[in-house]
Image (cartoon, rainbow, N blue to C red):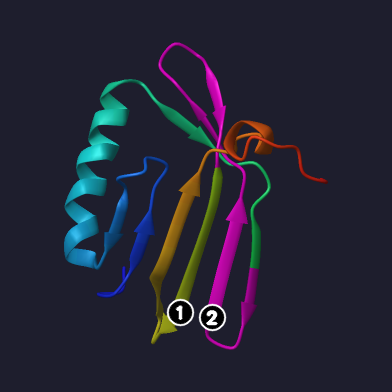
Amino acid sequence: MAEDVLVIGTDEAEWWQGKAAAVGVIQQQVAELHEAGVRYSSSDPQVNEVADVYWVADRPNVVLGDGTTVPVRFTAVATRAGDSLLLRQVHASIGAPNDEVLQQQLTL
């Protein structure tokens, strides 16, 4: 992760600016989810690059300990730093219908 990474999670409180703020919480959450039996499965990641900038978008499934599947939206942006890639931005979200969030239907 880059020192100035921005990580946005699915919970409204999950907005971490900077590696120092994000790493510890993410490590703890990964341990908690692993302990709860949560698994992840990728769907069809779309990876693109222009010069030294890379981005990925995917719709992985989170499989809860009871077998319930939750579809997630995931994006990330990274830049090349020598032989490595540095994550600059990571975002995960769970889609919600427009009529529930905005209280109206929109053209899809």
- Is 51 a magenta residue? yes
- Quadrant of residue 19 within the rendered picture: bottom left
Q: Are marks 1 and 2 in contact (CB under 8 Å)?
A: yes
> Quarter of the image containing the N terminus?
bottom left
Query: In the shown orientation, is residue 55 left or right of residue 1?
Result: right
Q: Say which mark, if any, is on residue 79.
A: 1
In percent of the image, x 53 and y 86: which residue is there? 52
Q: Amino acid at mark 2?
A: Val
The C terminus sits in image quarter: top right
Q: Which residues are magenta?
A: 48-72
Horizontal and vertical percent for residue 8?
39, 54
Q: Secondary structure at mark 1?
A: strand
Q: Which residue is mark 2?
A: 53
Which amino acid, by three-letter code, is at mark 1? Thr
Residue farthest to the top, as pictured:
66
Residue at image point 70% right, 37% down: 104
User: Along the horizontal axis of the image, is 42 left or right of 76?
Assistant: right
Residue lying farthest front? 103
